[in-house]
Amino acid sequence: MSERGGCGEPAWGPVHRDIVDLLADHPTDVPAVVDHLTKLQDMLVRLPPLLDSCPLADFNKLYLTITSSVLDGLYADRFVDPVFLSRLDVEFAARYFDALRMWSDASPSTPRAWACLFERMRGPDARPLPSAAAGVNAHINFDLPFALVTTFDHLESEPVDGSDQHRDYLEINKIFADKIPGLRRGYLEQWQLLIDMLNGEIDDWYQGELIHYTRDVAWRNAQRIWRCRHDPHQHERERRRLDDTAAALGRLLLSPLGAFLQ
Amino acid sequence: MASDVDTTPLVGRDDLMATVRSALLDDVTPGNTAAVFLTGESGVGKTRLLHEVGGQLSHGGALVLTGSCLDIGDASPLHPLRQALRRLDADLAPPTAASVRALLGVFAEDRAGPDGAGALLERVSRGLNVIAGGRPLVLVLDDLQWVDRTTRQLLLYLLAGLGDLQLSVLAAVRSESLQGAHPLRRVLTELRRLRSVRVLDLAPLDRSGTEELATAVMRRPLAPEAAEQLWQRSGGNPFVVEELSRELRDGRDGLSDTLREVFLARVDALPRPAHRAVHAVAAGVEPVEHWLLARVVGLPEHELLDAVRAAVSHRLLVGSADGYRLRHRLVAEVLEDELLPAERALLHRSYAEALTSAPAELHQARLAHHWRLAGEPERALPAAVAAAEEAERLYGYAEAHRHWSVAVQSAEGLPGVDRATLLGRAAEAAHHCGEYARALALLEELAGADTDLPACELHIRRARYLAAAGRSALAEAEYEQALAVADCTPGQRATAAARLAELLLQLGRYAEAGERAREALALAEQVDGATTEVVLASAALGFSEAYRQDPDAGLAVLRRALATAERAGRPEDVALAYLHLAELLTGPLNILEEGVVVARRGAERVAELGLGRSYETRLLAIATNGLFRVGQWAEAEKVVASALRHRPSGADAVELLLARCRLSVGYGDVEAADRDLDAVATILAGGGARHVIPLLTLRAGLAMWQGRHDVARHAVQRGLTETRSDDLVILAVLVWHGLRAEAEAHASRTVAVDDNAVRRLRGIADRVAARSERAARPVRYVIDGYLALCAAEVSRLDGADPELWARAAAEWDHRNHPYPAAYSRLRQAEALLAGRRKAATAGKLLRQAYQMAQALGAVPLTDEIRTLAGRARVALEERGAVESGTSGGSIGEELAALTAREHEVLAAVAEGLTNKEIGQRLFISERTIGVHVSHIFDKLQVRTRVQASAIFLRSRA
């Protein structure tokens, strides 16, 4: 079943205990998520052999920056429906923490979309931008649609185009773009180029339509999952499909080709 | 049936077993609930553990009910519970069996009411109470990832303590299922915070556990290479370890590398009849009854028995009293690709035919399932309709909606089917279970279909669905269109106008709401029997006037509506009229005393009309909150207790628990407050976002009395990130709590002040102030009171300003809310004393605050006043000229320090009643009585019940 099946060394080397203890807590609000990511960042940069250049730390740092901006936005009255956005943010982060937890337990269920990035923590070193991009890929292309569905389900609402929630959701794109000029120049555009290049190879990923941002793809995928959420079998097929596609893209980002981003 | 599953020892789970046992039985105090959720991947041994723990708890004196959830997606509401009861019925002696059958009968009854779903929950919990007969009840549920929505709600209801049942829940969840968008994910995230809930992850075995299990199966130790290989291949998954070691033992090692291959080889080795039996079970709904399997495979009895025995010995099937199952999900996965589609369809047809001739468990749902998969839509249709109607009878609208959808699908292209009716009912069920987009889509299909549904009716329904989905602008447009179309009857017009008025009111467009409401009233008066519309429109008009300029006119309208409703005599209309009138008085008009009287009178009246469960509880919740604000806490406590006797559910229950918790926070009864907060959190874990902020506010208030200012800060921060910017009142209350937490942190020096938080809170307070200038007058009035408190709290951080506190006190005096008014006096006195000014004024304020707090029974506030008075050497008792609490006053004076409620408790203590008996008499919890008694001891300066009783009896003499 598992190739690594508990063999010997803990997944997080010398900071294993710290990370496992941190992950034992499940944050339930946005301030707590920011707190969690901050603590995680301190631990990841202590992880040998790559230390400061740990590829996961590159992603975590970016994610922390974005989540902090979301938190500021919530305090500053930036969103129409903060209940939705807070729940989404918490549920979204929970997926990342779940993936880390499964990796800590050497669980064969670790999403492959994430595993391809986690595997690189031992090296070889990857460039920061593709590393962060690989994390963003797993998080947005795989985790986000499910986080959206769970959030809507919990709030007894639905993913409807043009709704307040949809507008708030798109507002996050601006946070990606506004707050991180390097990201916008560096990869939202280039990354899109890469995705477009790949478009033909990854079948039915975009269902033929020209995409603008991956986040829109996540919204569409959420609507797709929403419709089959009561059917365990179809839901599972959908999950595998997204995991496979995100994993393929992630591996590509971390391959020498990914260096093209930087 | 021969099976060696239980002979394999349970390895490596001793600690876990002990933990679960104590969490569910030994550590549960009487009257409380507990839950353990076991998560883990398939094959890790969850079912086995449920079985073992269930057995242990049963030996420990608990009544154990065991059921499993089904993955056919379109099962029946409450299936796992009904299955558990039927199993119990089979095992029990007749007297208990009668109570089980009585409860099973509840599910078969046809009884709809205004609060049907809640009434059903209540009746189920009553039934369980009778069955348990005083024993602790344990509900063991397997495969919870497939739980239906009604069962989920029942679990949360019972775990919140609303069923008044000592219940423990032990449930297993496949962790793979939680990875996607499963609703249980959020439920578990919320529940795992609670003290009474454990979520335990069942990990695979470690290496030595793996070897121990393999050795037990093989009955000899493994060679080192074999052990290594087994460890690598199994990853410690007990199911895999067991099956692989069995292969090894039987000398089949090497042929099959993976579990899949192991099972494939076993299937191939089966004799033909056994082969058929296994595939038949795989296509059935588990457990497959023996008679049913016999019909489906069509074998003579003895051959069938041989076949089944072969399948069991090849470890593909297991048998139990209620039927056959596949040994494991993995077997199903292996079998999935082994049949041709036509073969599978044939099996489903055989099932459907066999079920047609004989009724069975889940009859209609299974029939619909099998006919659909047999490719026979015209025969699936009537079964799906029957299953949908059955689900609706049990208020399982989610399941009903799925059955209706199957019916609509099956009807596609069939001649002679009333498709419009199917679409209409499917849409309505979708609307009821919150599938608004789906409801609207079905309605569109209905509009497109050949239907004689009038356009007006269609617009009104569309508007209803849109409004429920929160899409107000579109809903408004639909109501407008309904009013504009020609085929609208006067009755429909009145309905549309009244609903539109209600919608506009919610959007804060008071002037337009008023206009529409007047229009609706005029229309309704011309129609016979449009009382509902009159009440609805009057409420909209009453509130819109109250928010604009003419509160008295609004009040008069609603009073008239009540009279109209009473004359017409429909109970729901009367109840609604009372509800709106009480809300108007205690809400925007802030005429609290009268509002309380109306609410209580209304509660009595609707109880007479037979609407006790639904409307009486709601009216009593309004009365409780009004009584709390005017400072009649003892009375409020009584009212809330009598409302909770109806065992309300959902939002009504949350409302009441929050009201009771507010009282407990005021009384300083930490344990009772915590319990109610946990109960509310349990219900809210089921979904929805309303009430989260009041929950957080109370948590912050409680934490401050406990000196846990960082906890309070966190609760407020969370609240601020989850509040809409137009919820000005809610924001104002939160900001006050936040600033107060920082000020208390500053004053007590226990926690460092968070300057960032202070800056943010002040910013939000400014924003609220600016926005409130545009708000309606009654809203502004409430906000101003809190903003006064905010400004005063800020001053505590940088040199206390007694003037600001004087202003706050005046504001709250004016609103007739003694609690914040007393608090403000305390702070004003504190500020004066800190500035070494006007000691006499400070003394007077402290005495006033003391009297107010005493009259409320607000213990923590009283304590703070006492502490400050002690430090400032202020005598709190007017006449006694001695410090409070010191003995020496006459007996009458000693008793004067007691609140009304404490007086009642003391009288009962003097009668020799126990706390439990007193609790029953006064409708409050035993624990709360304990708190009252300790306050009484404190105030009377005694240590025993006998001493307290003596003082009480002497005062009577």
Image (cartoon, rainbow, N blue to C red):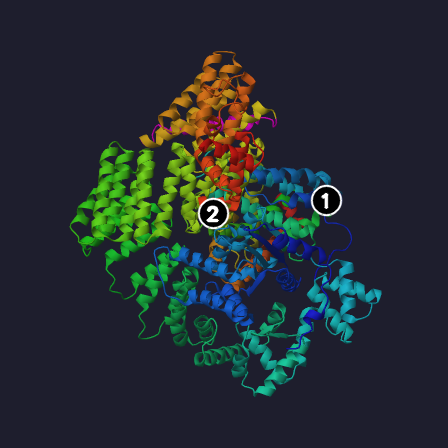
Q: In the rendered view of the protein, which quadrant contains the N terminus of chain B?
A: bottom right
Main SS of the magenta part reads helix
Name the residue at 49% across, 31% down.
Answer: B737
B769 inside magenta stretch: yes
Which numbered mark, 1 or 2, is in the foreground of this view? 2
Q: Amino acid at mark 2?
A: Gln
The residue that label 1 is drawn on is A17
Q: Is residue B405 left or right of residue B756?
A: left
Q: Is residue A229 visible to the viewer in this orientation of the structure?
A: no
Name the residue at 68% across, 76% down.
Answer: B265
- Quick one: SS at disc 2? helix
Find the distance from the CA under tag 1 to the CA under tag 2: 50 Å
Please state the extent of the stretch shown in magenta in the rendering: B750-776
Q: Is residue B337 above or below residue B746?
A: below
Q: Is residue B860 left or right of residue B567?
A: right
The residue that label 2 is drawn on is B920
Image location (x, y in percent) of residue B885: 53, 25
